[in-house]
Amino acid sequence: MIQNNGIIEYHLLPHEKLKINKVNIIHSLDFLNEFNISKVYNWIIFSNNEDIKICISTSGIIEISIDINLSKIEESIQLLDKLAKKIVSMLNLKEKFLIDLYIAGLEKIGIESLIKQKIEYNELDFDFKSEIKVRIIKNAANRIILIKGADNVEKITQIYSTLTSTKISNSDFQIKEINLIQSKTLTKEILLNN
Amino acid sequence: MSTKIKQIIDIIKSECPEYSNSDIENAIIKHLEINLPDIISNVKLPEKSPTSFSHKIKGFREKIQRRKLSIDSSKIELINDLENIQDYLKENHKYDSADIITQDIIDIDKSSSTNRANLLNVDTHIARIEHEMEEEYNEDDNTLKKLRDMTNDSK
């Protein structure tokens, strides 16, 4: 039996909404010609019917998911990043992208004991060095980590290592509480800056 | 179109008389798209063939994938619409109303990622069952090998 297997989903999100023709997506990505292709809503799905799925939306979102042994997670993230960038280049997309990463199936996270000390909760949001959002969702036996909004894969792997490290300290993160007052202040700050 | 499908459309139309035929057809197509893997496996396989269960598992995982994409698509659409409303409110100096919309956007984003994570959780369990059934001990190495091949610049 394979131990510690899980699923990694790597999403690349363009800063601005794009408009890509479905036919162009299929024709540009000829290196995926052995994959099955299907269309769902505004998505094209390339699937090898086994362990790799690549979904590309007409608005420029690229989502790649793989089934993997999570002991090889860092190499997997690097390879997913490389593959996503290859797709961006083949689709000739010039825009800047942000990365969202979902990692599911983690039974052990270094941060777990700290979470228990902090708060009894099934879902935690962290504000990680201000611009990157991290959520940990506890679901049955699994833990799902969502790292959202990094502009490069190095930041993602750095945060992942910190989260899974046993030497994590309180100063590495802050629990984020988004509420109406904060968002109100935020809107006004943006308006004042303009 | 078969009589049976026409009958289904008539039933929906009697329940929702305010919607046009094309609205109903679109709704049916969306539903069929989500359930496509199940439909295909039902057409392809006799009910109790030895491989039908593993096909069902693959079909189920496809269905989860489609639901995730559906969450993503509707989230993008909804947030775009809300951002347009927000811009309009700001242009008209209705900042308090714009703040309410800001909170709505945050809530939608958060609930979408929770829904997505729930589906991912189910998918992980199903993937584990699939791995166990197939007993492919080297599968993960194969996944990495495939990724290495795919990112190889000479390809």
Image (cartoon, rainbow, N blue to C red):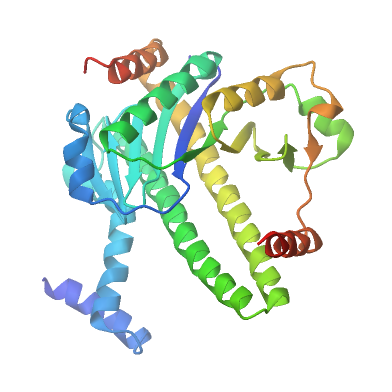
Q: Quadrant of residue B9?
A: bottom left
Residue that extends furthest to the left in the rendered view of this protein: B1
Residue B137, position as x, y percentages in the image: 41, 11
Measured along the vertical axis of the image, is residue A50 above or below residue A13? Answer: above
Residue B153, position as x, y percentages in the image: 27, 16
Measured along the vertical axis of the image, is residue B112 above or below residue A94? Answer: below
Nearer to me, B94 or A165: B94
- Quadrant containing the C terminus of chain B is top left
Measured along the vertical axis of the image, is residue B70 above or below residue B21? Answer: above
- Quadrant containing the N terminus of chain B is bottom left
In the displayed structure image, the side of residue B103 where residue B43 appears, left or right: left
Nearer to me, B4 or B112: B112
Nearer to me, B114 or A15: A15
Residue B134, position as x, y percentages in the image: 36, 20
Residue B108, position as x, y percentages in the image: 59, 60
Residue that extends furthest to the right in the rendered view of this protein: A117
Measured along the vertical axis of the image, is residue A81 above or below residue B68? Answer: above
Do we see residue B45 in this rendering? no
> Residue at image x 70%, y 74%?
B95
Do we see residue B6 in this rendering? yes
In the displayed structure image, the side of residue A146 where residue B29 appears, left or right: left
Q: Quadrant of residue A138?
A: top right
> Residue at image x 63%, y 24%?
A160
> Residue at image x 77%, y 45%?
A176
